[in-house]
Amino acid sequence: MKSGTSVKQRILVADDDLSILEAITLILELDTYLVETVSDAKVQEKVLTFHPDLILLDIWMSGGDGREICRTLKEDTKLRSIPIIMISASKDVEMSAKEAGADDFIAKPFEMDELLMKVAHHLQKLK
């Protein structure tokens, strides 16, 4: 690796809608992030193997509630510092997402620029 070349930041995207996963992955990879996806509630297992810098987490996951997954991750001392941005088609759940420990919230459908801005904002805070 050349000096000045930075390591790609790692983002885990958890959503049970495969078209959403594909769209978010494409957006983030074009913005030079390294992306892994999970389409079921086995988010914590993926976190432990992928070691993401940030997690985009759908609230309504098949096999589990994203808010419970968020709570579990935030209760783990080794994982709680990972920013979690929760995503939902329902704006009504933003408050419960924050109560579960989410660092931010994005309502579907979202603008690509809004997604990239929020991701960059939370990753910048880690530096």
Image (cartoon, rainbow, N blue to C red):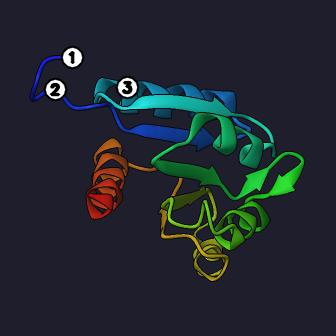
The first of marks 3 and 2 along the sequence is: 2
Q: Nearer the viewer, residue 66 or 54?
A: 54
Q: Say which element carries label 1.
A: loop
- Where does label 1 land, which residue? 1
Helix, strand or loop status at disc 2: loop
The three-letter amino acid code for the residue at tag 2 is Thr
The residue sitting at 36% across, 52% down in the picture is: 119
Q: Quadrant of the N terminus?
A: top left
- Residue to which mark 2 is pinned: 5
State yes or no: discs 1 and 2 in contact (Cβ < 8 Å): yes
Amino acid on which the number 1 mark rests in the picture: Met
Q: Is residue 118 left or right of residue 26?
A: left
What's the residue at 75%, 66% (across, down)? 72
Q: Is residue 126 left or right of residue 64?
A: left
Q: CA distance from mark 1 to mark 3?
A: 19 Å
Identity of the residue drawn at 31% across and 24% down: 30
Mark 1 closeness class: few <14, some 14–19, many ≥20 residues within 10 Å: few
Residue 64, placed above or below residue 14: below
- In the rendered structure, the answer to whether residue 29 lies left or right of residue 23 reads left
Name the residue rendered at 34%, 42% in the picture: 112
* Quarter of the figure with residue 87: bottom right
Q: Does the residue at mark 3 contact the one at mark 2 (Cβ under 8 Å)? A: no
Relative to 64, residue 38 above or below: above
Disc 3 residue type (three-letter): Glu
Compute the Cα span from label 3 to label 2: 17 Å
- Circle on res. 29: 3
From the top left corner, tell me how far across and down residue 90 is, in percent.
63, 64
Q: Confirm whether residue 76 shows in the render.
A: yes
Q: Quadrant of residue 29?
A: top left
Residue 80 vs 59, above or below: the answer is below
